[in-house]
């Protein structure tokens, strides 16, 4: 049976898209097939509705599962002409087509933005009834007191009841953060006595981006950065002397200036390029005037976007002030902030109790990664990122912070980190930046390192120098319990990341080998490959260690371990040094972990294909259904994971280090922002198996 939910604004400016997005994220992790439908879209083109495009992008939905109906003006016109049945009939047909392919469908109503909010409210209620869906009502609290908000919730309940709507839940959105507690206290229980969730207004969402303003004003990009996903703090009109202008300029300000004011343009450039001064989010040159020929080349290298507009200065300022912030495809920072707010404010287990969802039967890459983020968030850990002067690391840190996934410490020169963040439009507010060169932790870390390495002749002066290196400083932070895990390697080698851990973090009790795995995310399952990154020519003992550690890692992340010890021969069909080594390693695993399903030596095809397995190893409990694959050497493992990734479209997540006493993980130097986010989340989950650590101050 298909479950459907109708998300309906019951007051204007409710921000219901945040609720739809949070609901979609929750349901996507708890159902195999999720659909999304907007029967009424507010823009001019149903095919390019921002919310529809965002949901398609985030969850990989094809258009048949995520679509829009008719535009709001058309819908209101049909209602005015007495042809409302056409709206409801078309919506029922479209919803039915989606529902045939889904376990749950989110239907998002219109936002009460038209000239007749009462008519829209009525339209949404009638749509919900015609589709037979319960309503999740969203009350906007912007500008309301706590008592006014409570009254608005009561009115919404009564109005929906009068329309004979089934009410699933009420959520309050866009509340002033300082009044959230008062709103909770003022709310009166409804018939179901279920909780009403209150989500505060977030500046990260309510502020428009440079891209929003550029699109709304149809600006022409004239130079500088092409990164438009930058928050706009204030709009500053340069209508004064340079000195007075600079005294009021703040980081993130959008500067509007006549195209002939070369002095202001140069001043903005100088400010942006100086670590001690603010960096604008963008600059708009107005009046249709082009910059001076001598200034133009400088603007081309501005660390912020530069636009031109035919509008006058004050007209451009007026139009800019009227641009509304929207959550739409490509705005990863707003999406992260929205999902973080949902996770903090909504008890999704309680919400899911109100629904009847079929249990998911497959693990898709998106589901695995979304569940990974959720697991990390449940028990927040503190992770140190050692490469704060890499823009990818800072961007990942901002998104992790906005999604409220974990606590983060960023290592790097403070001025350089802040300058890079300002130039890239990255918001580091709320994140801790530590400079090893100036931190009061350095002396203590050096002394501890000297003590741990005294047997190798380490002296304190040299230890102080070594603690200037991010990987050593970060690893010592983990060693001493002031961070729960470390991620490094975006701009350094694997050896640079692992060496400090091998020197003084050491391996877990009973473990002799540090190795790695990749999670290989296929469309319908997750497989684990090891070791593809650390040990070039493992001995039989090391192969056994890798197999046991990989099985434990698989289980830790929800993959039932069935271990295949890979070789070019299956069972007893072949002989030779390489096959015999795998056979002995398999025996060692069985002795050490008799309860662990393991088969070897076995060829890859027999490990994954049931028909081949039935022919070659019919009695095996692993053959044909292996989930953990142990390669005989690094050359085979590394080439295989890359070949599978490139040829099959599988998503490779890793390498994930295993065997260390504390979680340290390595990044590829080609890592994307998403790779860094996933690795941080994995590191946080790894650290959750340990007891909470006492933490010092950075």
Image (cartoon, grey):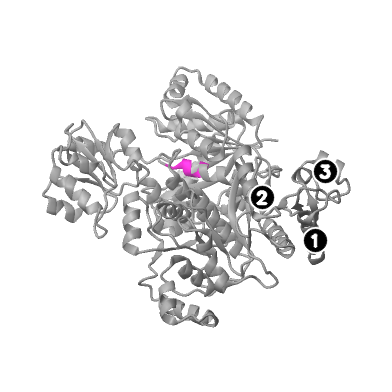
**Mark in front: 3 vs 2:** 2
For the residues labelled 3 and 2, the Cα–Cα distance comes to 21 Å
Left or right: residue 464 versus residue 28 is: left
Local secondary structure at mark 1:
helix
> Relative to 455, is 473 above or below?
above
For label 2, the residue is 636
Residue 15 colored magenta? yes
For label 3, the residue is 613
Q: Position of residue 682 (x, y in %)?
A: 58, 57
How many C-alpha atoms fall within 10 Å of the one at disc 1: few (<14), some, or many (≥20)?
A: some
Q: Position of residue 342 (x, y in %)?
A: 51, 50
How many C-alpha atoms fall within 10 Å of the one at disc 3: few (<14), some, or many (≥20)?
A: many
> Relative to 399, is 16 above or below?
above
- Label ID, residue 179: none
Please tell me which of labels 2 and 1 falls first in the chain. Answer: 1
How many C-alpha atoms fall within 10 Å of the one at disc 2: few (<14), some, or many (≥20)?
A: some
Q: Nearer the viewer, residue 660 or 231?
A: 660
Segment colored magenta: 14-20
Please tell me which of labels 3 and 2 falls first in the chain. Answer: 3
For residue 246, say whether it is visible.
yes
Mark 3 and mark 2 residues within 8 Å of each other at the beta carbon: no
For the residues labelled 2 and 1, the Cα–Cα distance comes to 19 Å
As drawn, which residue projects farthest toward the front?
A: 576
For label 1, the residue is 584
Mark 3 and mark 1 residues within 8 Å of each other at the beta carbon: no
Q: Position of residue 495 (x, y in %)?
A: 53, 62
Local secondary structure at mark 2:
helix
**Mark in front: 3 vs 1:** 1
For the residues labelled 3 and 1, the Cα–Cα distance comes to 21 Å
């Amino acid at each position: 049976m298909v479950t459907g939910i109708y998300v309906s604004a019951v007051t204007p400016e409710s921000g219901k898209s945040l609720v739809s997005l949070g609901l979609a994220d929750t349901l996507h992790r708890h159902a195999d097939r999720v659909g999304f439908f907007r029967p009424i879209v507010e823009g001019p083109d149903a095919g390019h509705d921002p919310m529809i495009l965002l949901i398609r992008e985030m969850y990989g939905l094809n258009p048949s599962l995520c679509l829009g109906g008719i535009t709001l003006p058309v819908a209101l016109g049909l209602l005015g002409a007495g042809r409302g049945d056409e709206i409801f009939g078309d919506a029922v047909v479209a919803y039915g087509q989606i529902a045939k392919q889904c376990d749950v469908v989110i239907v998002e109503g219109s936002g009460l933005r038209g000239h007749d909010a009462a008519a829209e409210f009525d339209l949404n209620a009638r749509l919900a009834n015609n589709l037979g869906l319960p309503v999740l009502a969203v009350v906007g609290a912007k500008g309301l007191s706590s008592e006014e908000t409570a009254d608005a919730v009561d009115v919404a309940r009564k109005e929906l009841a009068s329309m004979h709507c089934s009410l699933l839940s009420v959520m309050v959105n866009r509340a002033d953060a300082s009044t959230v507690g008062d709103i909770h206290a003022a709310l009166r229980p409804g018939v179901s006595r279920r909780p009403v969730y209150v989500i505060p207004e977030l500046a990260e969402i309510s502020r428009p981006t440079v891209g929003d303003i550029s699109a709304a004003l149809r600006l022409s990009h004239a130079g500088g950065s092409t990164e438009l996903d930058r928050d706009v703090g204030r709009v500053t009109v340069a209508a004064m002397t340079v000195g007075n202008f600079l005294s009021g300029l703040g980081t993130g300000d959008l500067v509007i200036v006549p195209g002939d004011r070369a002095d202001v343009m140069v001043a903005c450039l100088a400010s942006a390029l100086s670590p001690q001064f603010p960096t604008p989010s963008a600059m708009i040159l107005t009046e249709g005037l082009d910059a001076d020929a001598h200034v133009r080349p400088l603007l081309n290298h501005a660390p912020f976007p530069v636009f031109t507009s035919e509008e006058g200065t004050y007209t451009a300022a007026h139009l800019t002030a009227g641009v509304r912030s929207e959550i739409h495809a490509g705005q990863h920072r707003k999406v992260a902030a929205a999902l973080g707010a949902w996770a903090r404010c909504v008890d999704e287990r309680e919400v899911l109790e109100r629904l009847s969802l079929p249990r998911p039967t497959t693990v898709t890459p998106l589901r695995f990664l979304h569940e990974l983020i959720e697991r990390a968030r449940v028990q927040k850990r503190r992770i140190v990122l050692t490469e704060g002067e890499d823009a990818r690391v800072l961007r990942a840190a901002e998104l992790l912070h906005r999604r409220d996934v974990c606590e983060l410490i960023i290592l790097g020169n403070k001025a350089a980190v802040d300058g890079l963040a300002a130039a890239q439009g990255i918001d580091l507010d709320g994140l801790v930046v530590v400079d090893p060169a100036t931190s009061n932790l350095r002396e203590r870390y050096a002394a501890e390192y000297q003590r741990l390495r005294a047997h190798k002749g380490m002296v304190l002066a040299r230890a102080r120098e070594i603690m200037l290196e991010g990987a050593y400083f970060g690893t010592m932070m983990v060693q001493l319990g002031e961070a729960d895990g470390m991620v490094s390697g975006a701009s350094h080698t694997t050896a640079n990341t692992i060496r400090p851990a091998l020197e003084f973090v050491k391996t877990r009790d009973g473990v002799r080998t540090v190795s790695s795995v990749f999670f290989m995310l296929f469309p319908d399952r997750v497989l684990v490959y090891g070791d593809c990154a650390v040990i070039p020519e493992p001995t039989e003992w090391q192969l056994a260690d890798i197999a046991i550690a990989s099985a434990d890692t698989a289980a830790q992340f929800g993959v039932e371990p069935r271990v295949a010890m890979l070789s070019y021969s299956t069972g007893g069909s072949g002989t030779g040094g390489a096959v015999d080594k795998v056979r002995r390693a398999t025996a060692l695993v069985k002795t050490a972990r008799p309860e662990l399903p393991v088969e070897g030596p076995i060829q890859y095809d027999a490990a994954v294909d049931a028909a081949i397995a039935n022919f070659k190893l019919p009695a095996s409990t692993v053959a044909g259904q292996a989930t953990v694959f142990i390669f005989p050497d690094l050359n085979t493992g590394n080439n295989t994971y890359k070949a599978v990734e490139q040829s099959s479209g599988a998503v490779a997540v890793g390498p994930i280090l295993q065997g260390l006493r504390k979680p340290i993980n390595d990044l590829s130097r080609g890592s994307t922002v998403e790779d860094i986010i996933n690795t941080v989340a994995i590191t946080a989950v790894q650290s959750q198996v340990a007891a909470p650590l006492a933490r010092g101050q950075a």
